[in-house]
Amino acid sequence: MKSCPTCQRVFPDNSGFCPFDGARLTSASMAPPVATGGDPLIGGTLGGNYEIRRLVADGGMGRVYQGIDRARKDRVAIKVLHPDVAKDEVARARFQREYEISASLPHDHIIEVYDFQQDAERGMWFLSMEFLEGEELRSHLERDATLKPARLVRLFAQMAIGLDEAHRRSFVHRDLKPENIFLCGTRDGDQVKVLDFGSVRVNKGDFKKLTAMGTTIGTAYYMAPEQASGSQNLDGRADVFACGAIAYECLTGKRPFDGPNGPQVLMGILMNDPELPGSVMAKKGVEIPPGVDDAVERALAKKPDIRTKTVGAFATELGRGFGLEGDYLQWAKTSLAELETRITEAHAKAMAGAPAPVGGAMDDVFKATAAPAHDAPAARIEWPTEEAAKPAGRPAWLVPAILAASVVALAVAGFLLKG
């Protein structure tokens, strides 16, 4: 096995040069690692089998490295828990559950996790998983603000394949966001992978619950109302809401619910309805079809009973909103170029003989340059679980005002206690 000293990719022994950057290949064990700030793991091994080559990402829970799996003779991503995090029994249990659930699901559109163990010498807990080439959806949105229609449809069609299967097995992701959606570039378009099942909720009896009653897990901007309120009745429709919020951001360049801190974002999710994407973009001279607005609005319904039932149904409604025929299973396998052609033809057909649209042509959709969005910290706030009854004879505004004040007070108290 040989390795490129520049990009750290691995190749068969009979290879001579890296086709990506032209560097001469060397024995994988001889290729110098990429040093990063004196990190003691880089250049070493974990589990006796994994060579650590370079740092890829650093987060609150742990670090992700690019490494080489000697047994597989291939590159892998290695996710290592920070030592202080690993002391928390629940954090370790979630880490192990990420491995168990990810390993059990089909991997066309969900990242494959290979191994979970504790390094005998260093005592560190780590996962090894497939190494993906591409970028997070968040990186794309920070650069380009939005996604064009065909790419958006293909993205949610592929996500639906992975998530609907997870939901059929009673797994709720609970932390869907652009950072956990990875775009692997291929000749036909993105190959989408859903990442990080570390916050997963399991709605079946053979898994121990790891979340205390009345608390919330996830990222504030994309939480369903029932998730934000700490409800124990949480199912795949919470992930549908998150998909609706992500689609809204991909369409407009802004999140549907925003605010300076977690509590205010969650209060907006519980009490406010966002302006429809079509209305947002019409102000910028860009047209979004009414059917797309309808699909996003149903996915963001406050009550789960009236929300779109599955991610697949949402993906299908989204595509049909752009004039496509068929369903998400077909579009997930259709090339990006073909989807672009079909959407353009559908738009032209719909506009034939119709009044001139308010915005620009469909080819100009999603070219707005909204300010880049940045993620808010995950919120763990206790919320009231019962609605306050409206007393007879009191002003209509009184109960919502009391509820809003209570929400803010609870949120502040929760943050102070955590500090």
Image (cartoon, rainbow, N blue to C red):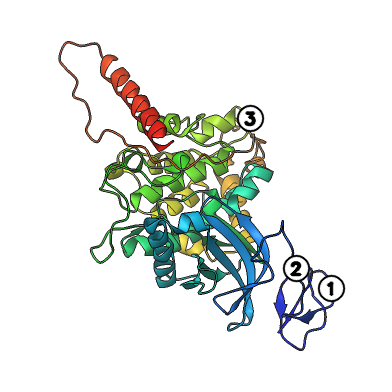
The residue shown at (31%, 34%) is: 383
User: Which one is closest to the eye, mark 3 or mark 2?
Assistant: 2
The residue shown at (27%, 33%) is: 384
Q: Position of residue 4 (x, y in %)?
A: 77, 74
CA gap, disc 1 to disc 3? 46 Å
Q: Position of residue 9 (x, y in %)?
A: 71, 73
- Dot 1: element: loop
Q: Position of residue 60 (x, y in %)?
A: 53, 50
The residue shown at (59%, 67%) is: 77
- Kind of residue indicated by mark 2: Cys
Name the residue that disc number 3 marks.
284
Note whether 27 is above or below 164 in the view shown.
below
User: Which one is closest to the eye, mark 1 or mark 3?
Assistant: 1
CA gap, disc 3 to disc 2? 41 Å
Note whether 157 is above or below 365 in the view shown.
below
Name the residue that disc number 1 marks.
23
- Kind of residue indicated by mark 1: Ala
Name the residue that disc number 2 marks.
7
Can I make out residue 400 in this image? yes
Circles 1 and 3, Cβ within 8 Å, touching? The answer is: no
Q: Which quadrant holds the C terminus?
A: top left
Residue 223: quadrant of the picture: top left
Q: Earlier in the sequence, mark 3 or mark 2?
A: 2
Dot 3, how many residues are within 10 Å of its Cα: few (below 14), some (14-19), or many (20+)?
some
Q: Earlier in the sequence, mark 1 or mark 2?
A: 2
Question: Left of 304 or right of it: where is 219?
Answer: right
The residue shown at (51%, 58%) is: 83
Q: Residue at the left extreme?
A: 392
Circles 1 and 2, Cβ within 8 Å, touching? The answer is: yes
Q: Nearer the viewer, residue 148 or 45?
A: 45
